[in-house]
Image (tube, rainbow, N blue to C red):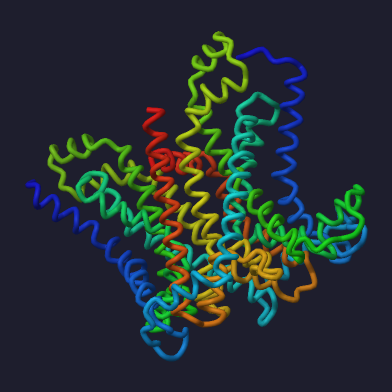
Amino acid sequence: MSGTSMTTRAWLLMLPLLAVMIAVIGWPLVDTVGLSFTDAKLVGTAGNFVGIDNYVKTLTGSNFQRTLVTTTIFAVVSVFAEMVLGVLAALLLNQQFYGRTMLRGLMILPWALPTVVNATLWRLIYNPEYGALNAALTQIGMLDAYRSWLGEPGTALASLIIADCWKNFPLVALIALAALQAVPRDITAASLVDGAGPFARFRFVILPYLAGPLIVALVLRTIEAFKVFDIIWVMTRGGPANSTRTLSILVYQEAFSFQRAGSGASLALIVTLLVAVLAAAYGVLVRRTAGSTA
Amino acid sequence: MERRSFLFSFFIHACALLLAIVILAPVVWLFIMSISPAAGLTAKPLVWWPQSVDFSRYGVLLSSVENSAGAAFVASLVNSILVAGMATIAALALAIPAAWTVSRTPSVGWSLYMVIATYMLPPVALAVPLYFGLAHLGLLNTVFGLALVYLTILAPFTTWLMKSGFDAIPKEIEAAAMMDGAGLFATLRIITLPLAAPVMATSALFAFLLAWDEFFYALLFTSDLRAKTLTVAIADLAGGRVSDYGLIATAGVLAALPPVVIGLVMQRALISGLTSGGVKG
């Protein structure tokens, strides 16, 4: 078969996927760009062209800046904790102990629990009047009076981060464990013979094997944490006093609660741009690590 | 194997126990709440271990008596199955030819990478036009419309998984079949697709779980029993005026059951899918 007809056939087989992707992703994205320069409302008129007004208002508004800070705190703290806990759990699961196979199997539980169920579960645990956390802490004497963990601006974000970590660190652990199992036995044995201590062994022998998969996990988790919506919406809806409002929640409120489609679109594109910048920065990081370990 | 002291072994076992408790405690508590009598859940001090076991809430939620909490729950369960099922089948139908093509004809690969890159897009970037689009087509608050929207998530993801699956099947096998006189589609049907069946199954499971888990679009594009999915129904319960926390917990257990069973049974396949895709990048 000639090269041209091979390529023609290739495009024909790609066509259904590409056509659907253009219809449900490409066109809406272009439309969002268009909307972002108008004052369109969700219902009613199409709106008028207002230039870059929406962007200027958004970027200079205190809502956006505060929300960006909240989102960054959520993403950085939860992803960092998930990576550290995940690697520690993987190192543990790679040791010999009774019930190891079972514990490895159980690690899939938090990952498999739907995000909304996880959020609901933790909402019940944090319940100010009847929650298990209040009950447990009071009964062991660590807490004098029941607290509203999700109702106080001081504790709400931290409580959310814990719930998010619980769901996501086991996945990091399973990815790291798979990488650990790929470390050849004779290399660790050789490093022992050479007298490497446990920390040196982790840093110079094991970490190079972990780096690749972990960076991929880091990239995916950071992007997801930056886009976070579900767990926050179900647990706090961005409250109290907007202390847990992340960017996706802000876009939702602007576009759908306040029905300002135009201004919501501009905000959504700013979020998209931030995620793209993040991804590009990570891309450079991935290429560098790939170069150094290869 | 290095020699291990008793103390080290004790330390490892203690850590393993702690990890097991951290993982299990919340899940077990969800189940206990679902079978505890309502009074025990609001008692102070809290009743951790119910005196009597009460499975009645499962009956309440799975009953189909009209206008009951059960009817609403069952309707959302059916909607979730329909939406996730339709979206998974459609995603695979789109992904398989595209993934195979890119695996065998790398020169068109750039278009696939553009599709995969859309994973980065926050759903909020598409939400407003999708809302207008669905409204225009009369597909707001329908399972069909929601399944269509779910393709934005499922199709790129399954294509990505399927491509690494096809990459693992040697081209030479296909070439040999063609030499023996089989046409392209016969080769694919007899040789390639059966070899790719395990990857297809893994991709289908992942896609189904992603759709089952989805909340944002379902919240925006569905409004009543005709299309509301489980995730939205549970969020409604959790945020509403339900006074029996056990009922909320029961809904959570039921919604978690399919993915948890799939996860436990298919663990090996799921993890290798996640890591192989992940390592290759």
Q: Position of residue B267 (x, y in %)?
A: 54, 42
Image quadrant in which you'd find residue A70: bottom right
Q: Position of residue A248 (x, y in %)?
A: 53, 66
- A25 horizontally vs B71: left or right: left
**Which of these two is toward me, A33 or B240?**
A33
Image quadrant in which you'd find residue A114: bottom right
User: Residue extending furthest top?
Assistant: A193
Q: Residue at x 45, y 56 (%)?
A: B207
**Which of these two is toward me, B56 or B249?**
B249
Q: Residue at x 16, y 44 (%)?
A: B182
Q: Position of residue A203 (x, y in %)?
A: 55, 25
**Which of these two is toward me, B80 or A161?**
A161
The quarter of the picture where the N terminus of chain B appears is top right
Residue A77 lies, with reference to residue B58, above or below; the image says above
Q: Residue at x 78, y 55 (%)?
A: B32
User: Residue extending furthest bottom?
Assistant: A44
Residue A215 lies, with reference to residue B247, above or below; the image says above
The quarter of the picture where the C terminus of chain B appears is top left
Q: Position of residue A48 (x, y in %)?
A: 38, 87
Q: Residue at x 39, y 60 (%)?
A: B89
